[in-house]
Image: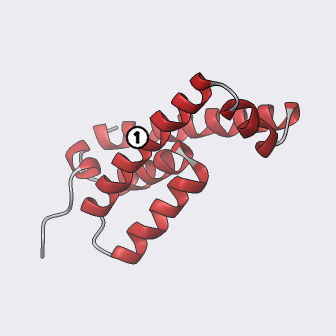
Amino acid sequence: MNGAKVVGVVCVAWSMVVVASIVLSWTEMGLWEGLRTIAATKWGVTTLVDLYAGLAFVGAWIMLVERGRPRAIGWILALLLMGNLATLVYVALRAFRAANVRDVFMPAPAR
């Protein structure tokens, strides 16, 4: 298995962990109640700021590597709604199409 496929498998595995975590969290409380609980502490707010700073960086990277702006904007909206689960799915899809690890993370050469 080449390096790109390993990246894809790791992203799929982490995606399953994130989905399982979401399901387990949902059994404790709903999303909005959870967000209110997080936002009630300074550490919770700091965690959200950190999350969205990282997602902004990933969104900028997606804008660089995607050729089509509508497709990139769709993925950025997914980031805002699903957080790093969208990042993992995006990277996995790129990895399974890539010939090597460099192709996963770098823009395709211009045609």
Q: Is residue 99 above or below residue 84?
A: below
Residue 30 place in picture, x, y as percent: 83, 42
Q: Residues within 10 Å of mark 1 (few under 14, many from 20)?
A: some
Q: Residue at x 39, y 49 (%)?
A: 56
Q: Is residue 12 left or right of residue 25?
A: left
Q: Is residue 79 left or right of residue 109?
A: right
In this picture the colour scheme is: secondary structure
Q: Nearer the viewer, residue 39 or 31?
A: 39
User: Image quadrant of residue 76?
Assistant: bottom left
Q: What element does badge 1 sit on?
A: helix
Q: Residue at x 61, y 28 (%)?
A: 44
Q: Nearer the viewer, residue 96 or 77?
A: 77
Q: Which quadrant: the C terminus?
A: bottom left
Q: Is residue 8 left or right of residue 107?
A: right
Q: Residue at x 43, y 46 (%)?
A: 55
Residue 23 place in picture, x, y as percent: 78, 38
Q: Residue at x 53, y 41 (%)?
A: 12
Q: Nearer the viewer, residue 104 or 62?
A: 62
Q: Is residue 101 above or below residue 80?
A: above
What is the tally of numbered marks visible in this picture?
A: 1
Residue type for callout 1? Gly
User: Image quadrant of residue 53?
Assistant: top left
Residue on which the image places disc 1: 54
Residue 86 place in picture, x, y as percent: 52, 51
Q: Which quadrant: the N terminus?
A: top left
